[in-house]
Image (tube, grey):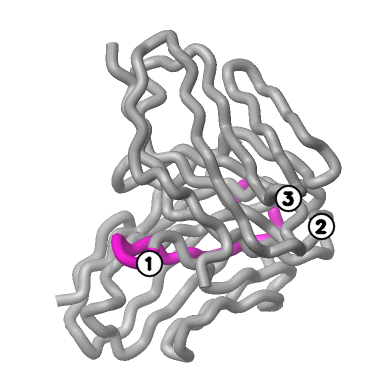
Amino acid sequence: DQQVKQNSPSLSVQEGRISILNCDYTNSMFDYFLWYKKYPAEGPTFLISISSIKDKNEDGRFTVFLNKSAKHLSLHIVPSQPGDSAVYFCAASAYGGGETSGSRLTFGEGTQLTVNP
Amino acid sequence: KAGVTQTPRYLIKTRGQQVTLSCSPISGHRSVSWYQQTPGQGLQFLFEYFSETQRNKGNFPGRFSGRQFSNSRSEMNVSTLELGDSALYLCASRHGAGNEAFFGQGTRLTVV
């Protein structure tokens, strides 16, 4: 049962343009969502996150949008740079955060982003 | 501030052997989680430790086990290795109040 899905295995964009990566989820209990960037043979690097009480969060060139009714989130990267080329994973958590809550991330399959110069 | 440190980075073991992987979390982080990444299954949650207690466990056989020490360092052990255990094993630590998990570089385990 794939609770978090990234339907696009790959995405190619031109440098300077917008990259939009999409993610869908099925578990209504998820209340926190994260995006990670990953290079081969390395661990994922945290990019940006969003709580289910918000619908948008921005951090520099990265913006995450959450549509709870559609169970959909997206990551926008503007402007895209060649150094952004990597695999992007969305992840979801169902435990509400805080020190006493568990932290179990459910990951999507990843989207390979290629930014062409 | 040092990041999450995993040792060793690479490991080759023979089927049937056992292996122990180590993870040192970011200073001050008390939650440590382990994940397995394989080409076919993606990133799968193994277990999470907090204050030396396992409080979440993924859907893996009992051959996969772990522990956490009083300094928050964690180890995971895989006994009776199978070829399918070949994977990148990732450790992540989390600060108490935050939801963001920060990952180490991983241990690449190859079972031959």
Position of residue B34 measured from the top left corner of the image (x, y, whole percent): 52, 65
Residue A90 located left or right of residue B96: left
Residue topped by disc 2: A96
Tell me the subunit letter for badge 1: B
The residue at the point 39 percent across, 58 percent down is B7
The reply to whether dot 3 and dot 2 touch (C-beta < 8 Å) is: yes
Tell me the subunit letter for badge 3: A
The residue at the point 59 percent across, 36 percent down is A74
In the figure, A36 relative to B48: above or below? above
Q: Amino acid at mark 3?
A: Tyr
Residue topped by disc 3: A32
In the figure, B14 relative to B48: above or below? below
- Look at the image and give the residue range highlighted in magenta: B24-41
Residue topped by disc 1: B41
N-terminal of the pair, mark 3 or mark 2, is 3
SS of the residue under disc 2? loop
- Membership of A112 in magenta stretch: no
Q: Nearer the viewer, residue B75 or A109?
A: A109
